[in-house]
Amino acid sequence: MLPWSAPPPTVSVPVEDTSSRRSFAYPREVVRELVSELASRATTKRLAVMLAQLVLVPASTITAVLLRFDNAVPPEIWTAVLSTMPALLGVRGVAFVAFGVDGGLWRYSGVLDLCRILLAVASSTVLLYVFIYSPLTPALYPRSVVIIDALLLVCLLGGLRLVWRMLPYIGRLTPKRRRRVLIIGAGDAGDMIVREMRKGGIYQPVGFIDDDRSKVGRSIDGVKVLGTRADLATIVAATKPDEALVAIPSAPPALVRNFVQLLQGFKIPITTLPSLSELVNGKVGVKEIRPMAIEDLLPRSPVALNREKVRELISGKRVLVTGAGGSIGSELCRQIASFNPAELILLERYENSLYAIVNDLMDRQIAPSVHAVIGDVTDAARVNEVFERHRPHIVFHAAAHKHVPLMEANPSEAVKNNIVGTRTVAEASQRYRATRFVLISTDKAVNPTSVMGATKRVAELIVQGIGTNNDDGCFVAVRFGNVLGSNGSVIPRMMDQIRAGGPVTVTHPEIRRYFMLIPEAVELVLQAAVLATGQEIFVLDMGEQVKILDIARNLIRLSGFIPDQDIPISFIGLRPGEKLDEQLVGEGEELEPSGVEKIRRVSVPFTIDADRFEDSVAALIEMAALGQHGEVIRHLRRIVPTFNCRPVGRRYESKSSEAAYVH
């Protein structure tokens, strides 16, 4: 062996590890056994189905014989029947297999399955007839028995499948599982909703209420008209419904409020329907039954404005919305997008709010060219950059601080956002020749008692001043009252308190406010842009002011509770800057028609000395930048003589007051 030669390698033969083979083969065995088991289960189920159907064969034959002989069957006939039964079962069984009657899922049986049954029974009956009545075989029983037997067998086989298919629905038809509903209104809408309820199996209508006495005692689709509105309390106590459904889409708010009042002593929620036109068009079913909302009880009908003029103004234009992520700003963006602007610029300083409205526009698939811009309206450089890049034709300024108690505690911040922000955006609109500038103002700017109201009044004066000296565009302001459902408004706060079991807090038993819906507020803003001819202020005819206490009581009733019994109401006192009621026009102002129903133009001459006003605003802004809160409030009073402010230095300290930031 050479020195560098290595010894021959030792070859080792591995010993077969049977345990590893078994472990490797185990999954295949499991799969094989599982398939076999499933096959056996399917075979067992099919055999069970076949056996159940074959049991019906002698049952139908015996029943046919009994029917033919009226239960007095001669013995020789029974002998003949029993002697032919094996042949009968064999022929029927073969026909069932041949035509697939033994297969199929009974739960999904239909016309095709019935055709198979008819073919199988008909063919096997023909074979039996030939066999029983052939020349080689004497007739054993009357021919009529054969015909009756075939008809009975078809009914039994089809009926068995029908019963099987109905089993899952039997539980749904049990009355105790259905929601008992008392329907108020025995008209077209009531008739339609009863039909829908009978289809759904979820609701059980227990009766109608209708003021037409000629209908009392009669039935609509099997549901009786139990009485009139005067009998409502008695009927509710007798029928014990789970809910009361107001099925009068055309009912005025006063009538709806009356029903709510009549139901105040009962712990039942109140629901309602969409409009009757939707019901007629088949767009609404029981799924659209919704809880009655507080806007259904407003002392006026919602205002519907002319949108075609708005479309003419916005279509093909570049539109900028500040505060685009807020309650008003986001709805403005949605409605503006539907009018096909060339570009929609969304300016917002809170990224989460901006992200939400941009995604909402994309999801609705109505978004034009959208530009999401993060920026602060008090940042002049950023605002000018946005205007330089996008050159908007129309500007809606919705960015503002709006919470009265918070602004009382932070007056300098109210000045920065509501005054500096408005001036910055309005001046940029003038500089870049926007044709329309619309300021979102508030009724709290009229004879203000709060810092927030005073700053919004200064913002109105700024817009009027710029509009007076501007020939290229119209600068206007829009005043409206409290917006139902907006962020931080009274309604969501009260609903949270009701869900928590109370108490519901109200500042004062006599406090009143104007209320409007978010879409209404936005339509007013858009319509103001159409109507604008100069430095005007527009207001909406919002009807009567509503007591906050009445809203609290109605919200509790609509939730299915009894006010002051199930959910208490507590009064926490007026907060700083708050007054008992609001106004839409101030001293020296007059309301004039605008040419559009329920929109008024505020006539007020702009008589303020422009230079002196500019100096006062500049001084106010400087004080706010230094955080001189006392001087800010005193200077606000000089600029807005009607500002009747609270004593300086009053702040929120108690938790109960902080929890009441809702109005």
Image (spheres, rainbow, N blue to C red):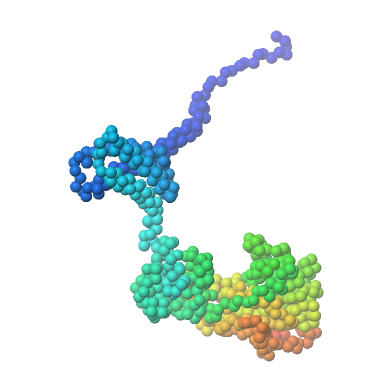
Looking at the image, can residue 559 be seen? no
Residue 229 location (% of width, % of height): 41, 79
Residue lying furthest bottom: 588
Q: Residue at x 52, y 24 (%)?
A: 17
Q: Is residue 110 left or right of residue 478?
A: left
Residue 61 picture quarter: top left
- Quarter of the picture containing the C terminus is bottom right
Front residue of 440 and 635: 440
Residue 281 location (% of width, % of height): 52, 67
Front residue of 375 and 627: 375
Residue lying furthest front: 135
Considering only vertical position in the picture, is 281 above or below 143? Answer: below
- Quarter of the picture containing the N terminus is top right
Q: How many numbered marks appear?
A: 0
Considering only vertical position in the picture, is 277 above or below 596? Answer: above
Residue 60 location (% of width, % of height): 29, 45
Q: Residue at x 71, y 71 (%)?
A: 314
Residue 319 location (% of width, % of height): 73, 70
Looking at the image, can residue 38 be seen? yes
Q: Residue at x 66, y 83 (%)?
A: 595
Q: Residue at x 80, y 78 (%)?
A: 472
Front residue of 476 and 163: 163
